[in-house]
Image (cartoon, helix red, strand yellow):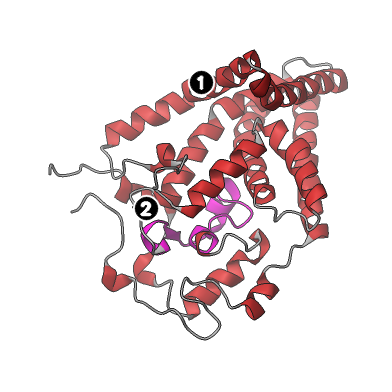
Amino acid sequence: MTDTLVPDLAARPEVFPAEGFKANGMLSPELRSQFRRIHDLRNALSVIALWTFVVALVCVTVWTHRWWVALLAFIVMGPVHVRFAILMHEAAHKLLFTKNSINDFVGKWIIAYPAFIPITIYRRSHFAHHREEFGPEDPDVMFYGGYPCEPSRLRRRLLRDVVGISGWKNFVALLKANRTKAGRQIALPILLVQIGLWAGSWIATGAWWVYPLLWWLPWMTQWRVLNRLRAIGEHGGMRKDVDRRATTHNVTQRPLARLWLVPYNTGWHLAHHVDMGIPWRNLPRYHEALCQAGYVTDAITYPTYRSLWRAAIRTVPAA
C-alpha cells in the first residue's frame, strides 16, 4: 500500500508521438480541426433544456404542494447545479459557442452568474490548473489534495459540505467582496442576478420559499458534496507530472454517474486534460482515439467512481 494513486510506470507506456498524434498526446493539426468543432445549435438547446427543466421542476413542486415533492425537487437540484457548473466550465474554455461574444454572454449571464460563479476569475484560475496540475498556482488543490486520506478526514469534509458550512463561507466571501470597488465589480452582478431569480420566482409562483429551498440551499449543500466527490474522482491521490496519466484519473463512464455526477461528458477528464481545447461533445471520440493509440489502458482505468473513492479513502501507513 502506498500513499499515492498514481499508476505504475508499467501501466503508462510511452506511445507518443505516433501517427496522428504529437508527443504530448494532442492530435495533429489536420485531425485536431475535426475534433475542435463546436456544435452551436445543440449547445444552445442544451442550455435551453437545462433552464426548462429548472422551471418545470419549480412548477411541479408549487403545483402539487406536497412536502415530499419539494424534498425530491431539492435533491434533484444538486445535479442541476452540477450541470450549470459544467456548462460554465465549457464557456470558460470558450468552447460553448463559436462566437466569443455569444459564448461569454451566455456563459456569464445565463449560466455562471445564476450559479454564483465569477466566470472571469474562474477562467483565469482554471487555466492555471490546466497549465500545471498540483503546481504552485493550481487553485483547485484544496478540493483534491491530500488523498489517500483517513475515512474520518473525508467524513469531516463531507459533513461540513452537507450542513452548509463550506457553502456559507463561499456565500459570505461573495457578500464581503462588495466592500471594495474591485470586488463589487465581480460580486454585485452575481448578487443582483440572485435577487432577480428570487423576485422572479416569487412573483411567478406566489411562493417566497421557491428560491431559497430549490436554488440557494442546494447550492449551499448538495453542490458542495457533489463537487468534492467529482474532484476526488478527477485528481484525488495524483501528483504533479508531465504525464497527464499521473495527474488525472480515468474512470469508466456509467449511466448513473453521468446522470448525477459527471454530465456533459465531463467524466472523460483525462482526455480533457490531454487537450483542453476539445469541446465536450467530442471528448468521447477523443478518449476512444487515445485508447486505440494505447495511451489509455485498462490498467489505469477505474471501473466505477465508487472503486476510485474506496482507493482514495483508506488508512495511509506512516512514513
Q: Secondary structure at mark 2?
A: helix
Which mark is on residue 97? none
Q: How many circles with numbers are drawn on the protein?
A: 2
Question: Given the current orientation, which residue lies at the most extreme bottom position?
Answer: 19
**Residue 206 falls left or right of residue 14:** right
- Name the residue at 41% across, 26% down: 159
Identify the residue position indicated by label 2 in the image: 308
- Crowd tier of the residue under label 2, counting other residues whose Cα lies within 10 Å: few below 14, some 14–19, many 20 or above: many
**Residue 52 falls left or right of residue 91:** right
Segment tinted magenta in the rendering: 244-272
Cα distance in 3D space between marks 1 and 2: 28 Å
- Name the residue at 83% across, 58% down: 41
Question: Given the current orientation, which residue lies at the most extreme front position?
Answer: 181
Where residue 226 sits in the image (x, y, percent)?
51, 39
Q: Is residue 259 magenta?
A: yes
- Name the residue at 36% across, 60% down: 246
- Name the residue at 67% across, 41% down: 84
Which mark is on residue 169? 1
**What type is the residue that disc 1 sits on?**
Lys
- Quarter of the rendering occupied by the N terminus: bottom left
Q: Secondary structure at mark 1?
A: helix
